[in-house]
Each structure stands twice: as C-alpha cells, then as structure tokens.
Amino acid sequence: MAQRGGRGRVVIVVVALAAIYWAVAVRAPSGTRSLRRFDANRLADLETGMWQAYYAKQKFTLFRLLVVMLREQYHYSWQKAVVAGYHLAKAAAVFGDASGDYDRVLPDLEAGYAIARDWTGASFDPAAVARAELSWWTARRDPASGSGADKNRVVAARMTDLYALLYGVPRDRVAEAARLRVDAADLRDRGADSADFDRDPRGVDWKGVSFLLHQSYRSLHDAVAE
C-alpha cells in the first residue's frame, strides 16, 4: 500500500509539473495574434536595446530581448518565442560576424518568419520576406550603395520592400516608416564612426536613435493598423 501511495504522489507531481509547464511555456497570452497590432513605443524601446546589444556583440541580451518582444507584441507562447527568437538572433549574430557569404543566414531568417506567418495567420512568403530582410542588411555594407544620403535612399527602398511584403500593403504606405528607421541606423553608424566604439560606445547618440525609432514605429503602426 505504501508503495502504491508513493507512486500516486509521483504521478500527481508529474501531472502538476506538466500543467505548470503548459501554463507558463506553451499557453499563449491573451490578445490578438497579429503582426499589425503592436505597441509602437514599447517596440521602439526594445529595438533600441536590441541594436545596442547587437553592436556590443552581447548575443544573449539580443536573444533575450527578441524573446520578450515576440511574447509581448505578438503574443507568442514562451516556448514559441524562444524558438523563433533563437533563429532570428542567430541570423543577426552570424551576419554581424560575417564578411561575406551572407546567404547562410537565410535558413534561420526564413524559419523565424515561417513561425510568425503560421502563428499570426498571415499570408506572406517567409522565403521572400527573409530575402528582403537580408537585402537591407547587406545594402548597408555594400559599397555599391554609395554613401550618405544616396546610401540611405538605397537602404530605405529595400526596407520599404520588406515592409510591403511582410504586411501586404502598398509601398507608399510604409515608405516613411522605412526612411525613419534607416535614419536611426545612419545616426548610429555616424556616431560609431566618430569615436572608438569598442572603447567608448558613448560616441553614439542613443537618445537620438531611440527618438527616430519611436517615430518610425508610430508611422508603421498607423500605416498597417487593422
């Protein structure tokens, strides 16, 4: 009898742990699953942190912020957010360390976007969106993009393509949001170029970067809101 009672307690514990795991990791938070519904200001704050982590090569911090963003803004379960965040953070980290052969990040980008499409019921092509994402990343490094305002126009055009594909809207509706986000990236780059960023990251005007990202995501929110 004592042995059977012990087994019963084990079963209860296992069932309880499974229920806790489901409630914490698998169960999605309440709210609409949509890429078009997000808190623009919170998303801008998270992106500023992700950019800081990316350029400081703080890979775990980048991953953590991505997971938080996916959970908060798109109502992923923690389990789903961890898997998607892993793919997206890995793609960014590999690209950040690479000097060529950039297409190797595409499988992870596509995997991350496939999760987003399936989770939100969107209709975009994950492969096309992954390619568009990589296109604006590489345009910022490609000497053929030019420099200064010319380069920013090239990068903004590619980011506009990404937004149009991802949200299924005309390019002109998301062009301003793309331009402002590129302006934020350009401000970051100019600050890094004016100081030894590895020794003194204070050379970057992160408040200015954050301001532009807030403007960008507010514009994007208005352009794609359901």
Image: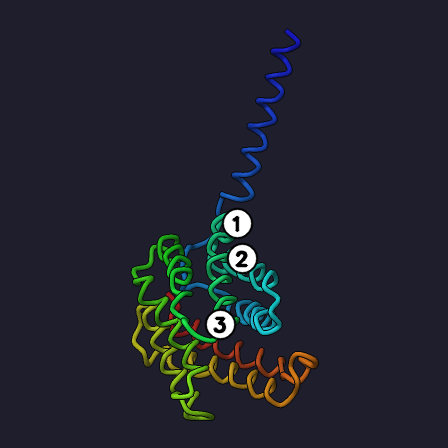
Looking at the rendered structure, the kind of residue marked 2 is Val
Q: Nearer the viewer, mark 3 or mark 2?
A: 3
- In the rendered structure, the answer to whether residue 191 lies left or right of residue 126 reads right
Looking at the rendered structure, the kind of residue marked 1 is Trp
**Residue 205 found in image quarter:** bottom right
Q: Badges 1 and 2: C-beta atoms under 8 Å apart?
A: yes
Question: Which part of the image, by quadrant, shows the N terminus?
Answer: top right
Up-down relation of residue 126 to residue 18 (above or below): below
Name the residue at 60% across, 73% down. Answer: 52
Name the residue at 50% across, 47% down. Answer: 79
Looking at the rendered structure, the number of numbered marks drawn on it comes to 3
Q: Earlier in the sequence, mark 1 or mark 2?
A: 2
Where residue 44 sits in the image (x, y, percent)? 54, 72
**Residue 146 found in image quarter:** bottom left
Q: Earlier in the sequence, mark 1 or mark 3?
A: 1
Residue marked by disc 3: 98
- In the rendered structure, the answer to whether residue 185 lies left or right of residue 226 reads right
Where residue 105 sits in the image (x, y, percent)? 42, 65
Up-down relation of residue 179 to residue 7 (above or below): below
- In the rendered structure, the answer to whether residue 61 lies left or right of residue 223 reads right
| Numbered mark located on residue 78 in the image | 1
Can you name the residue that lies furthest to the top here?
Answer: 1
Looking at the rendered structure, the kind of residue marked 3 is Ala
- Mark 2 lies on a secondary structure that is helix
Up-down relation of residue 83 to residue 129 (above or below): above
Give how far apart the Cα atoms at labels 3 and 2 are: 23 Å
- In the rendered structure, the answer to whether residue 48 lies left or right of residue 111 reads right
